Amino acid sequence: MNPNPPPGRDDVVPATVASPHVGGERKVTIGDVAARAGVSKSAVSFVFNGRSGVGAEARERILQAAHDLEWRPDARARALSRSRAQALGLVIRRDPSLIGTDPFFPQFVAGVESYMSTVGYALVLQVVDGDDAEQEAYARLAGEARVDGVFLTDLRVDDDRPAQLGALGLPYVLLGTDHRDDSAGIGLDDAAGIRRAVRHLHALGHQRIAHVSGADRYVHSRVRRAAWEGEMAALGLDPGALVEADFTGAAGARATHELLDQPEPPTAIIFSNDIMAIAGMSAAADRGVRVPQDLSVIGFDDIPLAPYVFPALTTVRQDVFEWAKACAHALVALVEGGEHPPVTLPSVDFIVRASTAPARNPAEPRQGASA
């Protein structure tokens, strides 16, 4: 690509933030960055606005030059010149008292910020605990022009939020795949991870493989459930027991007790996230059921704690940080130029650790079984 795009609207204005003086006489400007990188001012503008048209090598020179000169665009002047807020929104519908127990969102926010900080955007975060509060949050963000676009998380079955945002004129990027439109959204292949989990357990000799799902109102809960059911059928296994939960540790523990109370309890459980899986292992231990000797356990997410619990958790790894960066890049591009760029995400990985083992011999008494 041409590192010197044709002249046009220069969206990055000369920096007026505190920055070192060149030669002790004046502040660094976009022209100084362009000169150091050997490109035009428009090329610098394109890079810091997240727009295409600058080759990878020229982009690296521009970013390095800006770093060396400790220069960044003036967000306030930039927003005024473009009639934009220079901010993107993330509305999380969760009980505020439980938000700290979900490792997904801290990782997601870190990934979003890692990209947005390079293009002069800020993140406006709101936590709400109901439908009405969520709708009001989106209406307020749009009505007060506080953000230029939003990240839409936790897609629900028959979700009306895309229509609401469309009516508000608020651009958005959907995290995950809309089952009504496979081309919509940016998501990882959850189903592939669950299928690999089922195959792993089947190879270890397990036949009674249960699943603890997330809330059924979420599309990704249904995707993971369908993958579990489909792979069980493909392997000729009878459908295992299913318990619906809500992604919290307390729900994971309750679901585990419910499954282990069955006349023929499962020899393996696939949980829809790591928090529930870790809580499930604790619940099993409280009953004297050994993991993995009596019960194999698999999680989903590969949170930072997963390798350090005992036994270390076998799980499906999704790179939330890179996923978030891709979503941020796409949303900035959507806001800036009205185009949704192609997105390539890393594949999910299946991480085998110590919480899975060959199925117990049926003739051997199970630990923790009722007398």
Image: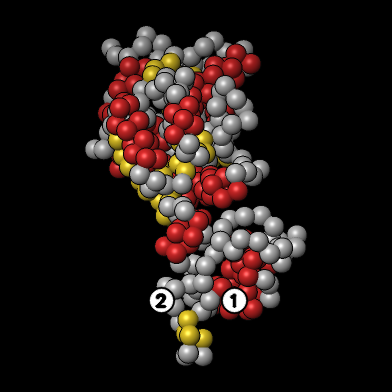
Q: Which residue is mark 2?
A: 18
In the image, what residue occupies the spot 63% across and 70% down?
41
In the image, what residue occupies the spot 55% across and 27% down?
178
- Whether residue 159 is visible: yes
Tag in front: 2 or 1: 1
Q: Position of residue 194 (x, y in %)?
A: 54, 28
Question: Along the polypeptide, which appears first: circle 2 or circle 1?
Answer: 2
User: Vertical placement of 125 versus 267: above or below?
Assistant: below
| Residue in front for this viewpoint, 89 or 349 | 89
In the image, what residue occupies the spot 75% across and 63% down?
2
Q: In the image, which disc is placed on residue 69?
A: none
In the figure, is residue 249 to the left or right of 35?
Answer: left
Q: Quadrant of the N terminus?
A: bottom right
Circle 2 crowding by C-alpha within 10 Å: few under 14, some 14–19, many from 20: few
| Residue in front for this viewpoint, 14 or 158 | 14
- Whether residue 316 is visible: no
User: Vertical placement of 336 versus 127: above or below?
Assistant: below
In the image, what residue occupies the spot 56% across and 73% down?
30
Q: Position of residue 124 (x, y in %)?
A: 37, 48
Q: Which amino acid, by three-letter code, is at mark 1?
A: Gly
Name the outermost residue toward the left: 97
In the figure, is residue 252 to the left or right of 270?
Answer: left
User: Vertical placement of 364 versus 354: above or below?
Assistant: above
Q: Secondary structure at mark 2?
A: loop
- Can you tell which quarter of the image residue 232 is in? top right
Q: Check the image and tell me how it is coloured.
A: secondary structure
Circle 1 crowding by C-alpha within 10 Å: few under 14, some 14–19, many from 20: some
Q: Which amino acid, by three-letter code, is at mark 2?
A: Ala
Q: Secondary structure at mark 1?
A: helix
Q: Which residue is mark 1?
A: 31
Q: Position of residue 286 (x, y in %)?
A: 27, 28
Q: Quadrant of the C terminus?
A: top left
